Structure formats: C-alpha cells, structure tokens
Image (tube, rainbow, N blue to C red):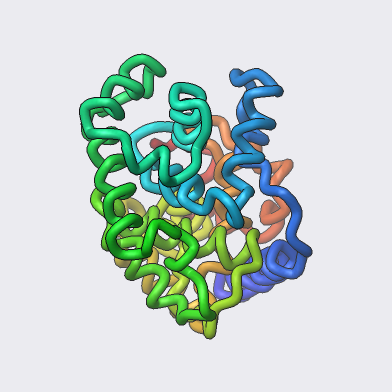
C-alpha cells in the first residue's frame, strides 16, 4: 500500500508543479459554471483579474466564498459594480452597510446575504483603514506566506480555508512573489478531503487539522502544491456518489481496498 501512496504523491507533486510553472494567464473563475451568461462571466473575470486597479475585487470575492458555491461568490463584486456603476475603491468605500445590504438583496445573493453584506462592508473599512485603501498591500513587498495568510485571517468571516485558498491563488496563479511558500496549506475543502480519504492518507471523517498536518508531512516545503490537482480530481471524477474512477489519472494507484471508491460516500 505504501508504494502506491508514494506513487500518488509523486504524480500529484508533478501535476501541482505544472500548474505552478505555467506563466500567468487570466484566471477563469467560472470555467465550471454552466448557468451564468458568457458575457457576464467575461466581465466578472476581467474585474477579478485586474489586481493592478481593482485588487479589492479579488479580496472581497474570496471573503464571500463560504457557505455558497464558489462561482456565486466570484460574481458578487461584479453584481455590486453594476449597481454603483463601477468598482473604484473610493466609490465603494462611500457605501454604507445598509446600502450594501440593499444591493445584496436586490442582486439575490444566495444564503446568509445579510451576514455576507456585513463581511463585505467590514472588509472595505478594513482595507481603507489598515491598507490605505489599497488591498494589494496585503501581498506587496515580497512578504512571507505566513504573513499573507495571517492578513487574510484578520478579515471578518475568513477562516483557514479561505485564507489559504486566497494566498495560494495569489502565489500559484497570479505569480505574486513571496519569500517562501511553507505556510500555504491545502484548503480543507470537501473535494480535497474526499480524495485524501479515498486514497488512504487520512481516515474517514478526519478533521481539518488532520488533513493539514498530513499534507505538511507529505510536502513540507509547499503543502499547498497538492491543493489544485486534488481539488480538480474531486470536482471532475471523485464524486461523492458514482465516482468516475476510470477517468482519474490516479486510478491505477488508488487504494480502493481501503477507501472502497465503488461504494457511494457522502
């Protein structure tokens, strides 16, 4: 069993390194979204990718990415921009909490929209106060990965999952320079946990801490290198029910005798 797991880790590390080595290309935050109109997705992507002018759009979208589908969270800055005719930070910072709640209600932000509106408002005020209205100062000047994760954790509504996800996207996709990548963990997403469970690296119903320390042991220099490859496997193939094992590139090495991938799991 150990030799299979060693093979799996090598495959995942290679895949993760391939993602890391790719030059920056505009990120498609909606590639798996089949519902949203193409033009809306294009405009939302342009906003989220423009770290030079609208770094706060990416930060605010990350903060929204909990308790709802990721694609719904990524759309929120664009929806707000429609209502205020732009997304410049000065204009954004003039919005009161009540106004933001009205926008969230009008744009039909799903689930816990009142709480999310408060997080959105509080984040704007924090960026204004702590980062001189420039959200890019969260990651500017080549900080350590630990500092970037910590700064995201200081925003209301942000836990380990969002903080590590945001830092990893900045490092891996946006190619933001950091002194190290030791503190970029995998995000304890349900997709990631399912794959690590079924491949036998963590027990069923493992805690987020168990997952985190498992990946730190497997890849201490950059634990987050496993994040995107494993997340994509969970999203595309390793479904909770009826997993498409034959399509997964880990199929020949997945220890089904332990995880029983053929049996539906939740």
Q: Image check: 77 left or right of 177?
A: left
Q: In the picture shown, does residue 41 fall above or below 166?
A: above
Q: Position of residue 12 (x, y in %)?
A: 65, 65
Which quarter of the image is occupied by the C terminus?
top left
Image point (39%, 53%), residue name: 162
Q: In the picture shown, does residue 223 fall above or below 163?
A: below
Tag count: 0
The image quadrant that residue 216 belongs to is bottom left
Image point (34%, 67%), residue name: 151
Q: Position of residue 230 (x, y in %)?
A: 57, 55
Which quarter of the image is occupied by the N terminus?
bottom right
Say whether residue 190 is visible. no
Q: Position of residue 254 (x, y in %)?
A: 61, 57
Image point (67%, 56%), residue name: 250
Image point (48%, 69%), residue name: 139
Q: Position of residue 142 (x, y in %)?
A: 53, 80
The image quadrant that residue 176 belongs to is bottom right
Say whether residue 184 is visible. yes
């Amino acid at each position: 069993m150990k030799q299979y797991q060693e093979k799996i880790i090598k495959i995942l590390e290679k895949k993760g390194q391939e993602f890391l080595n790719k030059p920056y290309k505009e990120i498609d935050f909606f590639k798996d979204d089949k519902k949203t109109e193409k033009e809306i997705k294009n405009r939302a992507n342009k906003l989220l990718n423009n770290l030079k002018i609208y770094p706060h759009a990416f930060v605010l979208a990350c903060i929204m990415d909990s308790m709802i589908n990721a694609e719904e969270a990524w759309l929120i800055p664009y929806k707000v921009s429609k209502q205020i005719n732009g997304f410049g930070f000065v204009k954004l910072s003039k919005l009161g909490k009540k106004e933001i709640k009205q926008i969230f209600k009008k744009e039909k932000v799903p689930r816990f929209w009142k709480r999310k509106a408060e997080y959105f408002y509080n984040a704007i005020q924090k960026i204004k106060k702590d980062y001189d209205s420039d959200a890019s100062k969260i990651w500017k000047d080549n900080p350590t990965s630990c500092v970037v994760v910590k700064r995201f954790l200081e925003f209301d509504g942000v836990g380990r999952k969002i903080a590590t996800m945001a830092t990893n996207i900045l490092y891996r996709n946006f190619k933001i320079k950091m002194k190290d990548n030791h503190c970029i963990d995998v995000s304890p997403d349900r997709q990631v946990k399912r794959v690590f469970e079924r491949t036998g690296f963590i027990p069923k119903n493992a805690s987020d801490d168990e997952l985190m320390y498992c990946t730190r042991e497997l890849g201490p220099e950059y634990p987050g290198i496993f994040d995107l490859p494993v997340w994509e496997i969970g999203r595309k193939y390793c479904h909770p029910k009826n997993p498409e094992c034959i399509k997964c590139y880990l199929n020949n090495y997945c220890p089904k005798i332990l995880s029983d991938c053929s049996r539906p799991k939740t």
